[in-house]
Image (cartoon, grey):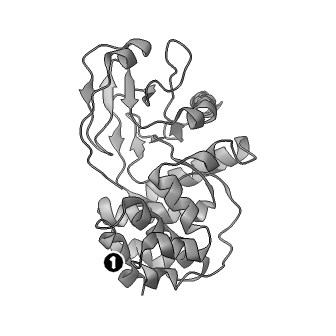
Amino acid sequence: MIVTVALVIPPPEVLDLFAVPEAPEPLPGGRGASFRAGDLVLSPGREGEVAQWLYPMLARLSVRLDEAPGRRRRDLRVALPVPARDGSWVVDGWGATRWEPGATTCEDLEVTLAAGRLLHAQLDAVVRSRPPGLDRREDRWARAERLVFGPTADLLWALDGTASDVVALLEDVDLGREQLVHADLAGNVLIDGGGAPLVIDVAPAWRAPRWAEAVCVLDSVLWWDADRTALAPWRHGADRQAMLRAILFRALADGPGHDEPYLGVLDLLG
């Protein structure tokens, strides 16, 4: 989802530890909170505990993909996380990745989904068990995710009467094997200067890839002008159940007063 937030400039100590100029430039897109500083992109809201295992893994994956023998120009890439001068991956909630000149946001849903599938295959190969720290996350997205996959009574209580029609449609259906997935793909796949898909801002979750794809389709239809016909394959069976949980996930994370667009998708599912 695209959310506009109050602009918070990286403080001097963050710029110092990442060894970048003291005149960061705000970047468009996403939540509108990231800055370019020198050859880095600085983004706020990063969790140190998660970053301690996520960023080194992504850094290794990024280098491996870029240097793979026989690599083609348009093969998958992953944004390279960069540590601060003291070796830490997060400074006062700010993390850094390498700036990619010429990269633009991918607004083609099929390309985004294909990049997500390639990414998930790579993540499945290198992360074989649930990483530490995921269960201790307390941000609104983590809480919403746990509720959507938890007991129905807890979910109904959290929704406080709204979206009960959606909850009534939930069934105990196997969505597929769980693994590390990117739970916020829409808007976080770029096309680099050479035409390769470049995945940024990995939002980690330990869920079935089908659910992560459902969130991507939902966000793309609502916020990235994807055609509503993209919802057609999600009307039946396990795909429908994944989409219902995607709807509830976003409705819960955004909270009362902001959930109407998501709940309106139910009418499109039939």
Q: Secondary structure at mark 1?
A: helix
Determine which quarter of the picture holds residue 261.
bottom left
77 is higher (above) or lower (below) than 260: above
Percent of width and height locating residue 29: 29, 44
Outermost residue toward the right in this view: 128
- Residues 96 and 216: in front is 96
Please indicate, yes or no, whether residue 184 appears anywhere in the rendered image: no
Identify which residue is drawn at 61% across, 77% down: 238
In this orientation, which residue lies closer to the viewer: 78 or 29? 29
Q: Is residue 26 above or below residue 224?
A: above
Residue 190 image-quadrant placement: top left
Q: Position of residue 28 (x, y in %)?
A: 25, 39
Looking at the figure, which quarter contains the N terminus? bottom left
* Residue receiving disc 1: 264
Amino acid bearing label 1: Gly
- Front-most of 26 and 231? 26
Position in image of residue 211 (x %, y %):
56, 64
Q: Residues within 10 Å of mark 1 (few under 14, many from 20)?
A: few
